[in-house]
């Protein structure tokens, strides 16, 4: 029997698809909601690309905004001091134990020189595991007893790496499986006296560099190398922003505090590469041409070093193959990302997702609106009205980004476009069915004999 447009097969398919589309629009934010961080929950897959990241990401050109920036970013807070591979002495990048210790001596002298310039804050995109170097104690003192607030890096390892290294001694608390990260052993850089202006933050980034990492759940390592409680540890950029705001007499804004409470890593825009001033570490320590080869220890001091620092926050980082990341700006060093993250947090230049409740309300409103169009208007007029409404919604979303830094997820803008498309196809199907039925009922004219 030919399909006349009203057959049970086609009707069942359309009704099923319509039901699934409605359920997707209404329940999507709840079904695909996830904690938006890489190392959450009891089952962790650090290298897995989560489907929800693509669904709940920043669609329809939002990622272009993360590349081009928004709100007319005006960098004026962070300045980079970088130790670059191919520019600084080669021994600073040699992995031999002796040269690792020499790198700590270099950092000790560099920190002391920057401290003498009295910036508002020093941030170190470095972590310091125990090395047993003679330079460990001078490095510890220059950080712990700093007259300038210092935020240094804390490193982590995955649970798998910890178990492989610790072996049978990897005793754990009952809560240890709640996090996939383990605190890495490090030098004790806490101040011995009442000095409380030194703090640490995790240098681990989100797997999506477009997001500002705020915190990670970490298994605390006990003195006997076993695992203790699980604590949510703030990242380097968040600790730096909090420290700077506190020293300036301010507090983090309410929007950022809510993101931290909800454990959400927000998207951000990026400054152009030339937007953050950068100085070579060797130029901070040594007068140009005053050293040869690896003889940087005896170089003449740079008497004009104070002219290198115009911004209140100095971030010490590295540009090498060990710390290189893909990003919306292209391949950049981790220190460049950290500088952008700090600027973004302090300048309120990050994108927050609209709340789940608001998204749900908009989804339901959109369904009602499209259905009303198709009830009260002819199908094609209803279709074009729906598409116009969707364009207005997209424009509203961009205004929300540019003015308030909020973005809607894919559900309203993605499946929302599919709804009027499906409804016009459904109307066309009914139209074909009516035409076919009318054709069969039309009397056939016969000629008289």
Image: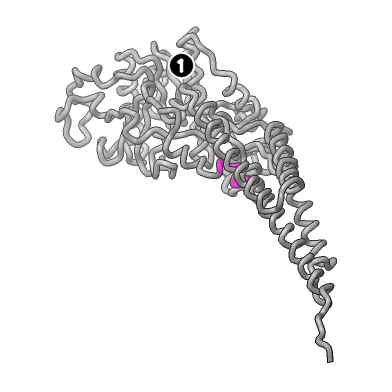
Q: SS class of the residue under badge 1?
A: helix
Left or right, 5 with respect to 172, comes to: right
Identify whether 252 is placed above or below 290.
above
Is 138 situated left or right of 30 in this image? left
Q: Is residue 97 visible?
A: yes
In which quadrant will I find the N terminus? bottom right
Q: Residue furthest left?
A: 289
- Residue 220, x across and y down, in percent: 61, 29
In depth, the one of 100 and 79 nearer the eye is 79
Q: Is residue 57 magenta?
A: yes
Residue drawn at 71 percent across, 41 percent down: 369
The picture places residue 96, in percent across and down from the top left corner, at 35, 40
- Magenta region includes residue 174: no
At x 70%, y 40%, the residue is 366
In the rendered image, which quarter is residue 413 located in? top right
Give the total of numbered labels. 1
6 vs 374, left or right, is right
Query: In this figure, which residue is indicated by the disc labeled 1?
Result: 244
Q: Residue at x 33, y 13 (%)?
A: 118
Residue 126 picture location, percent across and down: 42, 30
Q: Residue 67: name its quadrant.
A: top left
Q: Which residues are magenta?
A: 54-59
């Amino acid at each position: 029997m030919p399909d006349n447009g009203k057959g049970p097969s086609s009707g069942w398919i359309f009704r099923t698809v319509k039901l699934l589309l409605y359920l997707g629009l209404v329940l999507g934010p709840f079904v695909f909601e996830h904690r938006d961080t890489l190392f959450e929950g009891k089952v962790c897959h650090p290298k897995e690309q989560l489907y929800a990241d693509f669904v709940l990401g920043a669609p329809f050109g939002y990622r272009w905004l993360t590349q081009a920036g928004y709100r007319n970013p005006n960098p004026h807070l962070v300045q980079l001091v970088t130790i670059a591979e191919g520019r600084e002495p080669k021994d600073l990048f040699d992995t031999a134990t002796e040269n690792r210790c020499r790198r700590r001596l270099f950092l000790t002298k560099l920190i002391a020189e920057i401290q003498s310039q009295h910036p508002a804050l020093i941030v170190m995109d470095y972590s310091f595991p125990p090395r047993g170097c003679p330079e460990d104690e001078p490095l510890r003192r220059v950080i712990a007893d700093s007259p300038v607030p210092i935020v240094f890096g804390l490193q982590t390892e995955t649970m798998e790496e910890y178990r492989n290294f610790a072996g049978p001694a990897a005793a754990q608390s009952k809560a240890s499986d709640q996090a996939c990260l383990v605190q890495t052993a490090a030098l004790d850089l806490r101040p011995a006296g009442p000095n409380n202006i030194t703090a640490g933050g995790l240098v681990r980034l989100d797997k999506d560099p477009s997001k500002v990492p705020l915190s990670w759940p970490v298994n605390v390592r006990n003195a006997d190398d076993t695992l203790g409680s699980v604590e949510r540890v703030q990242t380097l950029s968040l600790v730096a922003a909090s420290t700077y705001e506190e020293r300036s007499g301010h507090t983090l804004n309410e929007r950022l505090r809510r993101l931290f409470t909800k454990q959400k890593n927000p998207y951000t825009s990026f400054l152009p590469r030339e937007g953050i001033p950068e100085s070579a570490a060797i130029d901070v320590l040594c007068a140009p041409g005053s050293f040869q080869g690896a003889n940087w220890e005896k170089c003449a001091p740079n008497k004009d070093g104070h002219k290198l620092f115009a911004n209140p926050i100095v971030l010490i980082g590295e540009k090498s193959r060990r710390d290189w990341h893909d990003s919306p700006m292209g391949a950049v060093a981790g220190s460049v990302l950290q500088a952008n993250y700090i600027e973004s947090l302090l300048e309120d230049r990050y994108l927050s997702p609209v709340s789940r409740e608001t998204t749900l309300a908009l989804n339901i409103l959109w369904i009602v609106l499209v259905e009303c169009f198709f009830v009260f208007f002819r199908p094609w007029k209803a279709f074009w009205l729906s598409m116009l409404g969707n364009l207005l919604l997209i424009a509203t979303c961009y205004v929300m980004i540019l003015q308030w830094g909020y973005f809607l997820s894919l559900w309203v803008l993605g499946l929302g476009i599919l709804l009027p498309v499906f409804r016009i196809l459904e109307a066309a199907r009914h139209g074909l069915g009516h035409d076919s039925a009318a054709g069969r009922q039309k009397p056939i004219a016969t000629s008289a004999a």
